[in-house]
Amino acid sequence: MTAIKLAIFGATGRMGQTVTRLAAQSRSVTVVGAIDSATSPNLGRDVGEVAGAGTLGVAVGADVASGLLGADVVIDFSTAGAVDALLRSAAHADVAVVSGTTRLSPESLTLLERAATKVPVLWAPNMSLGVHLLAELVRRAVQALGDYDVEVVEAHHNKKTDAPSGTATFLVQAAERGREGLIPVHGREGDVGARRREEIGVHAVRGGGIVGDHTVHLVGEFDRLELTHRAMSRELFAAGALRAARWIVGRPAGRYELAQVIAGE
């Protein structure tokens, strides 16, 4: 098997370092580029040493175009504000994109679609195969249980800056596919009145080192069903992204979904 050539965008962040460590252990992946913010204190350092994976011979740089040189695919775990530059450069350099960055703006989503006319692009708010199975279970349960109240609770580490998580939003969308007319309500405070049938509550917990927990509560008059996914390590998401990266290399330009990777289509 020929190893794919990988660039990592957001290389010195938590997820970028995790991707680097797993890639360094894989015979099917060779890291050829590492890109991070111009303000990163790790610029110029070997990306493997930053990640604790030993020397890989690839220095962290801030120039996107240079970081993509020679790459087949780039894995992106960065910030919403940084993705636009990556999409433009990847489309120009003919490099496939696998992105797990959440809370993309409408403008970024438009750029993502535009990039997909030139290169293969896979974007998912969660790279866990289990979460995608959970979403399908949520859709089916909400559809089957009819009048049950639906609430989504997510928990993450105390360094996470956005809420709700992209995965929580993904699960809300799955519930909406199961029952039309659901209206997300983000937390509750004060005299909000009785819960309306069409509400779907979305709640965020932040604390300690929680990697990522998501529970969908379906509550009826006499019973309650809870569907839960708990991430025990960031390696879960990195492994999913690497699997997607190996799968997408050589595909024609277009938008792809993680479900296709799971199905091996």
Image (tube, rainbow, N blue to C red):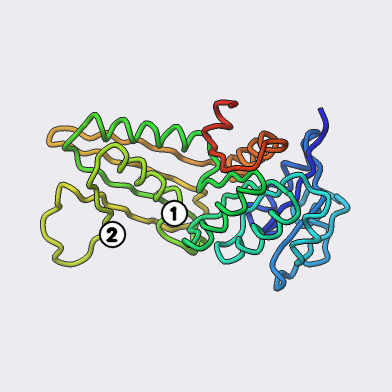
Dot 1 amino acid type: Ser
Q: In this view, does 119 lie to the left or right of 1?
A: left
Q: Give the percent coordinates (x, y) of residue 99.
A: 60, 50
Q: In this view, does 45 lie above or below 212?
A: below
Residue at left offset 29%, top offset 31%: 141
Earlier residue among tags 2 and 1: 1
Residue at left offset 56%, top offset 43%: 255
Q: Is residue 24 above or below residue 35?
A: above
Residue nearer the viewer, 199 or 95: 95
Disc assigned to residue 165 = 1
Q: Quarter of the image containing the C terminus?
A: top right
Q: Give the percent coordinates (x, y) of residue 143.
A: 26, 32
Q: In this view, does 190 lie to the left or right of 120?
A: left
Residue at left offset 79%, top offset 64%: 61
Q: Is residue 109 left or right of residue 228?
A: right
The residue identified by callout 2 is 187
State yes or no: discs 2 and 1 in contact (Cβ < 8 Å).
no
- Per the model, the C-alpha gap separating discs 2 and 1 is 13 Å
Q: Give the percent coordinates (x, y) of residue 12.
A: 70, 59
Dot 2 amino acid type: Gly
Q: Is residue 27 left or right of residue 12?
A: right
For this orientation, the residue located farthest to the front is: 117
Q: Give the percent coordinates (x, y) of residue 31.
A: 80, 47
Q: In this view, does 101 lie above or below 37?
A: above
Q: Secondary structure beneath disc 1?
A: loop
Residue nearer the viewer, 145 or 14: 145
Disc assigned to residue 138 = none
For this orientation, the residue located farthest to the right is: 57
- The quarter of the picture where residue 253 lies is top right
Residue nearer the viewer, 191 or 120: 120
